[in-house]
Image: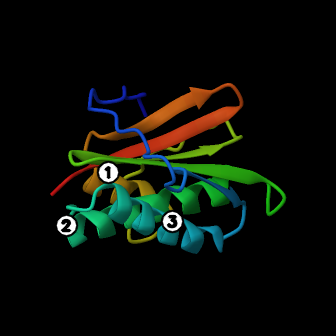
Amino acid sequence: MTDRERSPVPVRCTPPGWPPPVLLLVGEPASARAAREFVRDHVRRHAPDASDDHVETVVLVACELVTNSVRYGTAGPDDFLRLVVDADDIRTRVEVHDRVRRHPRLRPASAHRTRGRGLVILDALCPGRWGVTDLAEGKSVWAEVKAT
């Protein structure tokens, strides 16, 4: 997969007193639920005019990114990952940072595999608006969902 550049979109700062847009998660499947709750709350607060469809799409994207990171980007429950959310009236950006450098690969859809559908779902929800960025330690897999 080719790295994609961050889209030039307005940046919105978190107002004082609001929860930070970063959530530290442990490398276990239960983290997907915490991610869904955090993202839903964050988008509702920071983009109050967002449609229910937008919010639920962002929640699904975050869940897929976190699940992939737990499965392929952590060494187990003692390892951590970071979820970063940035929402405004134009789009919501979700990033998941983990310590593994290996990039995820988009594979063709298959009825024979029981895994590997997360990026197919991500690509359907955010066509051309997701990618991977290398970090000093690991990587960030990100996606942007346009406001609806």
- Residue 54, x across and y down, in percent: 24, 63
Q: Label 1: few (<14), some or many (≥20) within 10 Å?
A: some
What residue would you read off at disc 1? 123
Q: Residue 87, image x and y in percent?
A: 35, 49
The reply to whether residue 109 is in sight is no
Given the image, on which type of amino acid does mark 3 rest?
A: Phe
Element carrying mark 3: helix
Front-most of 96 and 10?
Answer: 10
Residue 97 position in % (x across, y down): 60, 43
Quadrant for the N terminus, please. Answer: top left
Looking at the image, which residue is at 56% across and 59% down?
A: 66
How far is disc 3 from disc 1 in space, using C-alphas?
22 Å
- In the image, what residue type sits under mark 2? Ser
Instruction: Please state which amino acid type lies under the numbered disc 1.
Output: Asp
3 and 2 marks in contact (CB < 8 Å): no
Mark positioned earlier in the residue sequence (3 or 2):
3
Taking the image as shown, residue 7 lies to the left or right of residue 51, namely right
* Of the image marks 3 and 1, the number of the one nearer the N terminus: 3
* Marks 3/2: CA–CA distance: 17 Å
When asked about the image quadrant of residue 34, the answer is bottom right
Give the residue at mark 2: 51
Residue position for label 3: 38
Tell me how the rendering is colored: rainbow
Which of labels 1 and 2 is toward the front?
A: 2
Quadrant into which the C terminus falls: bottom left
Q: Nearer the viewer, residue 20 or 32?
A: 20
Image point (79%, 60%), residue name:
76
Residue found at x 32% / y 51%? 123
SS for dot 1: helix
Question: Does 65 sit above or below residue 36?
Answer: above
